Image (tube, rainbow, N blue to C red):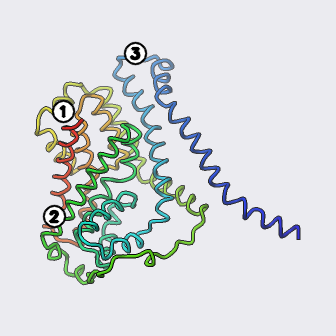
Amino acid sequence: MNVEKDSVRPLTTRPYMPLIKVLIYGVIWYLVYIQLDPFSNWFTYSLLGFALDSHLGGAIAFFVADAPKVLLLVVLITYIVGVTRTFLTPERIRTMLAGRRELPGNILAAILGVPTPFCSCSAIPLFLGFIESGIPIGITMSFLISCPVVNEVALALLYGLYGWKIALLYASLGMTKAVIGGLIIARIRPQRFLEDWVAEFQVSAPEQESTEEDFEPIPLTWEDRLESGKESVRETLSGIWLYLVGGIALGAAIYGYMPVDLVSNYMGKEAWWNVPIAVVLGLPLYASAAGVIPIIQAFLTKGAALGTTLAFMMSVIGISIPELVMLRKVIKMPLIWIFVGIVALGSIVVGYVFNAII
C-alpha cells in the first residue's frame, strides 16, 4: 500500500516542477538582462581603459552589450513561441484557413504567419499543403509574405531594443502588407501561374468555415510542451548564430567607425529616394532578423531614419534567393516577380509611414 502511495505522489507533484524551473530561469534572465549595459560600460571604459570618444572603445562597448542582449532576447521569445507552436501545428493552420472567405482568410493567414516557423526549405511543403487543402492562392501568399517579415524574433528584438510602440506598429504594417499583397495576387488570376503538376493538387475549397471539431487534440503534457520550447531554442540558435555574431560585429564596426554625416545623408528621411534605395539594396541580401537588427541599431545611433532602416530590414528578411528558387519549382516567373514587387513596394510604404510619424 505504501509503495502505491509513493509511486502516485510524483505524478501529482512533478507537473509543477518544470513550471517552477521556468519561473526561476525567467528571474535569472531578467536580472542578467538589466545589467548588460552597465557591464559593457564598466568592461570597456573602466577595465580596458578606453576613452569615451575612442572609436575602438565604442565598437567594443556596442558588441559587449548587444551580443548577449540579442542572444537573451532570441532565447526568450524562441522558447515562448516554441511552446506556443505545440498548440498550433501546420495541420491545424491549414484547417483554420480552409474554407475562409477572401478578406477574413487573408487577415487570419497574416496573423498565423507570425508564430509559424519558416525557412526556405519549408516554402514548397507549406505552399503545396495549402493548395491541396483548397486554400486560395491569395490567402497562401498572405501567409508567405507575413512569415519571414513579421516573425517572432524580429518583434521581440524590436520590443526589447525600441519599445512596444515600435514593435506594434511594425507588426501592424507588416501584416497589412501581407493582407493587401494577398488580395492583389488574388485579383490577377494566380492559378494560371501555377506549374502544371502543382495545379493537379488544387481542390475546390469547402463552402463552410472550419470549426473546433476539425481540430484533433494534441496529447502533450506541459512537460512535453516546455521541452519543445527548449528544442526550438536549440534549433534556432544553431541556425542563426553565424548571422547573429556577424551582424553584431558589423553593427559594432558601423557604430565605432562610420561617420555620422555619412549615415544621416544616405539613410536620413530628408531625401525621398533614400527609402527605395535602401529597399533595392536589401532585396538581394538575406539575413535573419537576429543578424540584421544589430546593424539597424548601429545605423540608428549614427543618425539614420527609423523608417529607412526598417524598410531596409524588411527587404533583407522578407525575400531570400533560396526561397525564390524553391518557389520557382511550384509557380511561374510572373508570379515570382509580382511577389517580389509586392514585398519591395510594401517595404517602401512602411518606410515612408515610419519616417512620417516618428
Left or right: 67 in relation to 169: right
Residue for badge 2: 184
The image position of residue 339, as x and y in percent, is: 19, 61
Residue for badge 1: 268
Would you identify the image quadrant in which residue 343 lies? bottom left
- Tell me which residue sits at (38%, 69%) in the image: 93
Q: Give the residue type that dot 3 points to.
A: Ala
SS state under label 1: loop
Q: Looking at the image, is 344 positioned above or below residue 31?
A: below
Residue for badge 3: 51
The image position of residue 47, as x and y in percent, is: 51, 19
| Mark 3 crowdedness (10 Å alpha carbons): few <14, some 14-19, many ≥20 | few
Q: CA distance from mark 1 to mark 3?
A: 29 Å
SS state under label 3: loop
Q: Give the residue type that dot 2 points to.
A: Ile
Q: Quadrant of the N terminus?
A: bottom right
Q: Which mark is residue 200?
A: none
Question: Exactly how many numbered labels are in the figure?
Answer: 3
| Mark 2 crowdedness (10 Å alpha carbons): few <14, some 14-19, many ≥20 | some
Q: Looking at the image, is 58 positioned above or below residue 327?
A: above
Single out the mark in the foreground, 1 or 3: 1
Single out the mark in the foreground, 2 or 1: 2
Single out the mark in the foreground, 2 or 3: 2
